[in-house]
Amino acid sequence: MDILPAIDLRDGKVVRLERGDYARQTTYSDDPAAIAQTFAQAGARWIHVVDLDAARTGSPANRDAFAAIRRAVDVRLELGGGARNDDAVRAMLDAGADRVVVGSAAMKDWPWFEKLAHRQELAGRIALGLDARAGKVAAQGWTEQTSLSAVELARRVRGWALGAIIYTDIARDGMLAGVNLDATAVLLAATDIPIIASGGVGSMDDIHRCREIGCAGVIVGKAWYEGRIDLAEACRIAGEDAIL
């Protein structure tokens, strides 16, 4: 399993939101590259980066910050936010992303996403972002609720050459209340795509439990910024069998 520490970017700064609410923001740093270096030094093999501005508007607003992160570290970078068409995905890859997370655009145009996911040159470089409230997927930076079932979509992509499914329980995101293990386990049973759990990680116990149920990775955000997770120890615990 891999630990993916998170850098959420808004206006070039490192921030965290509570439950995806843009009005409930905490700013942690104005130097994203320095944060990325700290993560790399702790042993992270992946860093999960989200352009929150692009997630809401579709227009990338943190290119310079991401470029600085890319220059600062020699680890793999997963980038989400604003991947809404072929050109945007290509621009994110060209900017140095090793994997691009597609969420809202997949919900709005599934045939396009299916074609994208089946492009041979993108095998393993696209992740499906499933951000859910009560099992139903949200889009547009979590500001729009859909009637689509996260579990049904996970079943639908069985056998596809996706790098991962990023499953986030929105109600728990930024709340440090623990990962929704039951819902995550249902997704694990529904698909053969590696599942990365996100939302609610609050302690080292969450790391252990995600590993026990078979997650391929865990995204750690606020828990690290608030000093509740020792990232080096988490990477050590998870790193014995990293599969991503």
Image (cartoon, grey):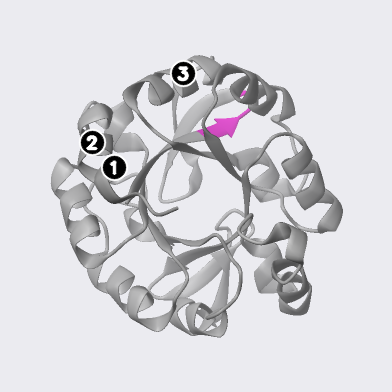
In the image, 48 versus 74, the foreground residue is 74
The part of the chain drawn in magenta is 8-12
Secondary structure of the magenta portion, mostly? strand
Kind of residue at badge 1 = Gly
Circle number at residue 37: 3
Q: Earlier in the sequence, mark 1 or mark 3?
A: 3
In the image, 131 versus 86, the foreground residue is 86
Q: Which residue is mark 2?
A: 236
Could you tell me if the residues under marks 2 and 1 are in contact, i.e. CB atoms within 8 Å?
yes
Residue 24: quadrant of the picture: top left
Kind of residue at badge 2 = Arg
Q: Residues within 10 Å of mark 2 (few under 14, many from 20)?
A: some
Image spot of residue 29 (x, y percent): 47, 18
Residue 135: quadrant of the picture: bottom left
Image spot of residue 77 (x, y percent): 56, 38
Q: Residues within 10 Å of mark 1 (few under 14, many from 20)?
A: some
